[in-house]
Amino acid sequence: MQAITKSDFIGKDAPVAEKRPLIFTRPTAKTGLVSWLTTVDHKRIGLLYGVSSLIFFLVGGFEALLIRVQLAVPNNTFLSAQAYNELFTMHATTMIFLAVMPLSAAFFNYIMPLQIGARDVAFPRLNGFAFWVFVVGAIILNVGWFVKSGAPDVGWFGYAPLTSTAYSNQFATDMSTDLWVMGLQVLGVSSIVGSLNFIVTIINLRAPGMTMMRLPVFTWMTLITAFLIVLSFPAITIALVALMMDRSFGTSFFEVSNGGLPILWQHLFWIFGHPEVYILILPAMGIISEILPTFSRKPLFGYPIIVFSGAVIGLLGFGVWSHHMFTTGMGTMATAAFSVATMAIAVPTGVKIFNWIGTLWNGQLQMRTPMMFALGFVWMFMMGGLSGIMHSAAPADAQQQDSYFVVAHFHYVLIGGSIFGLLAGIHYWFPLIFGRKVSEAWGKASFWVIFVGFNVTFFPMHFLGLNGMPRRTFTYDGNMGWNSANFIASVGAMILGIGMAVYFVVMLYTYFKGEKVGRDPWGARTLEWSIPNPPPEHNFSVIPTVHARDAFWYEKHHREEIDREKAQHAADEEAHGGIHMPSQSWFPILAATSILIGGLFITNHHFLGAIGGGVLLFITVYLWAWEGPGGYHLHLDKHGNPIEPKDGHAGH
Amino acid sequence: MTLSFTLRSALRRASSLMFVGLLPLLNGGWIYGPQSTFETHGPVAKTQLDVFYVTLWVTMIIFVLVASVLAYATLRFRVRTGESANQPPPEQSHGNPLIELGLIVLSIAALVVIAVPTLRAIWYTYDVPEAERANAYEVTATGHQWWFKFEYPKEQIEGSGTLVTGNELVIPAGRPVRVNLRTVDVIHSFWVPKLAGKVDMMPNRGNHLWLKADEPGYFWGQCAEFCGESHAVMRFRVIALSESDFAAWVAQQKNPARTVPGTQIGATPTASPRVEFASYTYERQRPNAPGWSEGFSRSPFAAWQQKQQADAGESPELIAHGRKLFIEKKCAGCHSVRGHEGAGISGPDLTRVGARTTIAGGLLENTEQNLHRWLTEPNNVKPGNKMWFGGYVVRNNETGVWEQQFSINDDEARALVAYLHSLK
């Protein structure tokens, strides 16, 4: 209701479409390729994010398997040093920026508006733009595999001065580092645009009665993550621009021979990089905080504390970046301060685990597949968190930094944490999105294979690190005591790979042939489950009114009251002109394409072409602005199905 | 009945999990090796290990407590198959502030237990303690892609400046050693796990660390910061000697390179010596083949001591030829042999390369086979290294293509091996 009363459409019907030039005609296709390229529907954009991020998840996983084959035995020659360095660089870059972040964005897009009772995000075209810019960034990052200079090979952290032209171009003219710089730059644009959209949506488009302290925890974590992205990406953007200047125009931000400071890169990178860690984990924590209450059939234990601890983690996350730099010789005081601050961040993280256990306590735990993944998350995240506490002690970290112990730690929080959370989310919301349910037997089978494979892969790495094996090494000697642990880890990686294959094959099968389910198959508690599945384009026939924290749980237990209210609201909305829907547009994808053109020219140091791309971008954005907001009204029959417009007022 | 059943199955699961978890520990191989952080040989590494054990115990206790509650809750409140899923929902409780506050206070207390030794150790490990500063020895380590240069600022040599070695750092045992950390190119990191945790070598930044070896010994080290193509094979050694051995070693180092009688340039106008003078037959190795032997790996310190003696059966003809090739093959442009030819500084100093246990940046054991291999096909041993790029092959600035300048054939390699191994 808020959305409607705040819009211009109060009390009047949609205006008749004026005659406009062809380029401003809004596409109206509801099916087919054009409908996907021009979509502004948050659900479709969510699906696009989901599918592309899962493709990149498989690519990143394949890169990891190649790495594990190389390290299975000492002195292996399966990969060259160069290929190995490209693979570990692209494995990390792909998993962080092209798999986990966009998969989280998929959930933000699809689920968050449904949870707050909104019909779309605040800026639907901008939402499409964020997705297409993400695709452009992904293309630029990966194009290196198909050209002579190869994929980026400077590590996902790109420490200066290894990224300078003097060192990355030593043996060949190299554009892979330029691709890496430009790719991350473009992905940053996508993330910031998307996040601003989510922030405005959550603050402005909540259904009546949905106060901030009634927001589902997943939406809260979306909000916090979006703020983290908006605040942290500028740091890496500055660093990347400075690096691009160094590489293209001979400036000396990091150029040692002219007095540049490589340590500056590390500070800028980790001021972004540490919040990034929470950008990766908070969405998964949000998903877990939805699943555990649903399958325990009771509310989240200590909701305010979970929310506040999420916010505190986000805040403290900006004050601990230098714990990635304990070995850079910061001096005693700075090391001590960042050590203690890092320990402090363990408190709000621990609190979440206590509260999740509290949620289980006295519940009726239904061991369905999403619940299995969620419990797996709690176990694995706890282990990763505890090894994180070990790192926070700087003197101990002097031995662990850049060793396989760190590799073990962050895979426990990123696979055992983020990925388990996201896989749980896919299982959990699959019935809502596609109206079909994954078979319990196959779902659980994939969980156990993934769980076992994951632990067999990464648990031995703790020992490898403490036994002195450094990271990012393409080979090791057989006399270091690292052979058996490496071999076991490689076997585990294959098991993990099989588990993931089972998971995705089962998902694909379910999409086509799975058992159909009705509304609310899990007995859930939040608003997204109150609508039919798959959800109609307009989401809610009637914007709900929220009376309690678990809004849908309340609805289910106060049917009469809610039905009365809804009938009233439906009448009000129809009186105000019907349901307002956004129009599709070509300009998001066109603007993103001009970024691709300009970006590729810049990475080739072809500056005339780059300026051309910039001009194209300006034109597309300018026309986008001239296109106007558009929008049309939808009227529903008494079953909630849209009535086809008769007078041509709608659908332009 | 159900409760005891649940507990028993929980215990059974826990014990089987524990067994799997302990398996690697029982098989001690997983925590002991040349770069183990568990086998410390000096106070810095020991302090760091002690802090690690504090964190380990605290987190293990937290893990056991939280995990058992989590396991109990999962098993106790599970809806078993057969039970109706349609039973009335449980009490919709929202939390308990007292419990939550209590747990927060407990977590903070646990972290304080970690924080206190952490802070103490940060100050202790940062620099040589005040009381020992007068006794400290100073060396400078400089990272290069992909090898380490070691300088001894206290040891000045008449006419040629500071004493310099490469890839094997010899230090006095029982004395604190302050290592100044420098780099000439990208970021490297100096890490000898048994003596001290790592500190990075940052461009335009004067870092340092300190370490002390309690006893004489031989320690493995490795670059720990990604520094380009051959980061994985950028290794080094630290050899700690007793005070008297160290003094003797320094005195010996200050001498010019050893010259086998009759091998000066122009002393023996021999024709190219033939293969049969060499004491080994060379077998070509695949790229990235291991370069160490069991015997060396078992007692590297003894191998080091052995290396200080001149080899038996040295052939003056071969050595003399090798010394000539050292100039002809442009080795002298980047390497120096003090007292002989060569004053290059972009490659490691080779004045006593024959007395080192390793070559190619601590990667290969210093045998005739391995040195031969390193000289004939350096890029298969250490991809991207600057002896190959810029030495054997040079970039044509017009076409951008790397063109081969020279190669070293097997006969030439034998002579060079003989010469380099005579440099003790």
Image (cartoon, rainbow, N blue to C red):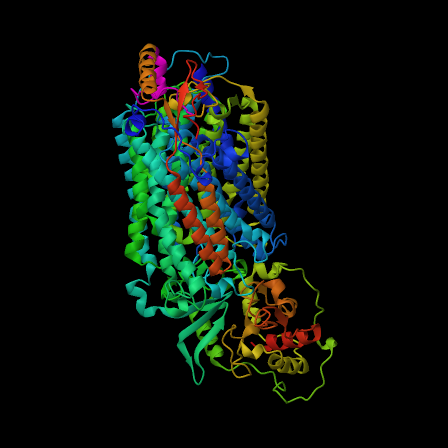
Q: Position of residue A171 (x, y in %)?
A: 56, 65
Quadrant (top left/top right/bottom left/bottom right) for the C terminus of chain A:
top left
Range drawn in magenta: A538-559
Q: Confirm whether the magenta stretch covers residue A513.
A: no
Residue A545 among those drawn in magenta: yes
Please tell me in which quadrant of the rendered image residue A241 appears.
Answer: bottom left
Q: Nearer the viewer, residue A635 or A435?
A: A635
Residue A378 appears in the picture as rendered: no
Is residue A348 shown left or right of residue A294? left
Q: Main secondary structure of the magenta part?
A: loop
Quadrant in the picture for residue A417: top left
Measured along the vertical axis of the image, is residue B266 above or below residue A442?
below
The answer to whether residue B352 is seen in the rendering is yes
Residue at 43 percent of width and 24 percent of height: B74
Q: Position of residue B245 (x, y in %)?
A: 46, 72
Q: Locate the N terminus of chain A and report the quarter of the image it occupies.
A: top left
Q: Is B199 or A119 nearer to us in this picture? A: A119
